[in-house]
Image (cartoon, helix red, strand yellow):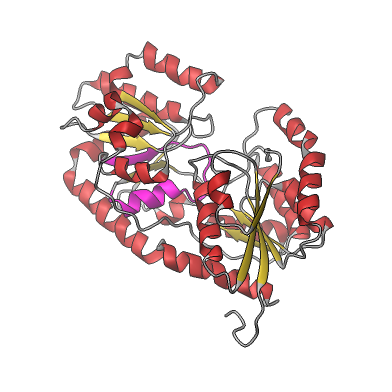
Amino acid sequence: MLKKMTNTKYKLLFITHSYAMTGGAEDEFERLLKYFSSFPDKYEVHGMFPKGERSLLYSAYCSKFGYYKYGHLPVTYDGIIPYIKYCLKSIIQIFQIVKFAYSEKYDLALINVVVLLWPVIALKILLIKVVVFVREDIYPVWLRHTIYKLFGWLIDYFIPNSDTKLKDIRLTTGKQKCSRIYPAIEEIIDPDLSGLEDKLGKENFNRLITKDVFRFINPARILKKKNQLLILRALNEIKTSSTGKIPQIVFLGYFDPKDEYTGIILDYIDEKELKEHVIFLGEVERKYLYKVYSLINSVVISSLSEGMPLVMVEAFRFGKPFISTKVGGIPEVVTNQVSGILVDFDPTDLSKAMTELMGDSVLYETIKKNAYNIYLRNFKLDQILKNTESVIVDLLNGKN
């Protein structure tokens, strides 16, 4: 525990990669800021992040904050150009962070995601102790392992969000300075739908409250990595099979109409005449997301890669059976047909899972009950934050 016999106050620097209003890693970062800043007698909290809409929320928890140029290591391989662009930002990012942190004498820097290579290098230039949270997977695997090995040399501690990552980091680096801490969400249950119509628009709101429609939600940005096309292909198989009700797919997350992958998604919807079965809600704050959850039946993600996604924890918490591809740390928590449904990267496999869940009330209730029990055992926010603080305190006191 923290030394209570002294008046030691630790100075912490928190750095994250994004200013987006939605996103699991962004939510985790804000929770960390909120928690550690709630103990002003123990911690002086500073922050650095790219400038944008959410950075205003982050800054409210910091006694000092600064901005640095947006940019992080790509987590999936889409050609060499994104890596070149990231490398070109290195001098700017390192300069901005060194300038901000140079005279502060931080006891510890907490890096919110493993894709922040240049900030880590900047902090090591200043000889600051560094802990990195590992919330996502980097592909290709050889690049992920290269980053792990480099960080194994540069940083003081890893905090991955799954046992799968924990084992991978230890095997790759040969080091034990690593603790798994699961993600968590706030204890918010708000069935009151006031304000939701104004936020989503009348048409979308009315479609969401239409009765006798089974709704799947995909709470993720429209990105190639998130693989939403698989969900639409599964939806099309259900539609053409004529074996039962056609569900509604609710996409909730940022999308850029000019993005190539978004264009592919929209073209597929038009080609297969799926528009009446699909809703795009765009990007909304988490308080509205929790309201939306009261109107849907199940959560489905089709990602090519994930860490330990917060949308899974949300599904568990709000009693919405979870369907997912077998990626990241999800299979270590979800038992197929017991606490969720795991599928391959195959539209037929996914369509069967969706159809089964819609038609089998016993399966639906079984998954709902078992998943909520897993939530209570492993994902309670107060315990997760205390576990995180315990690791941080041990680092500050030289015990890790």
Residue at x 33% of width, y 21% of height = 236
Q: Spot the residue most to the top.
A: 271
Residue 206 lies in what quarter of the image? top left
Q: Spot the residue most to the bottom.
A: 5
Screen quadrant of the N terminus: bottom right
Residue at x 65% of width, y 42% of height = 50
Percent position of residue 174, x then y: 71, 63
Residue 206 against residue 329 in the figure, above or below: above
Using the image as rendered, state which of residue 203 and residue 268 is in the foreground: 203
Residue at x 33% of width, y 26% of height = 279
Q: Is residue 193 magenta?
A: no
Total number of numbered discs in the rendering: 0
Percent position of residue 246, x then y: 23, 26
Using the image as rendered, state which of residue 246 and residue 69 is in the foreground: 69
Q: Is residue 16 left or right of residue 26?
A: right
Q: Is residue 103 left or right of residue 46?
A: right
Percent position of residue 283, x then y: 44, 34
Percent position of residue 168, x then y: 62, 55
Residue at x 79% of width, y 34% of height = 88
Q: Is residue 109 visible?
A: yes
The magenta segment = 297-319
Screen quadrant of the C terminus: bottom right
Residue 128 lies in what quarter of the image? bottom right
Residue 93 lies in what quarter of the image? top right
Q: Is residue 400 visible?
A: no
Residue 204 against residue 338 in the figure, above or below: above
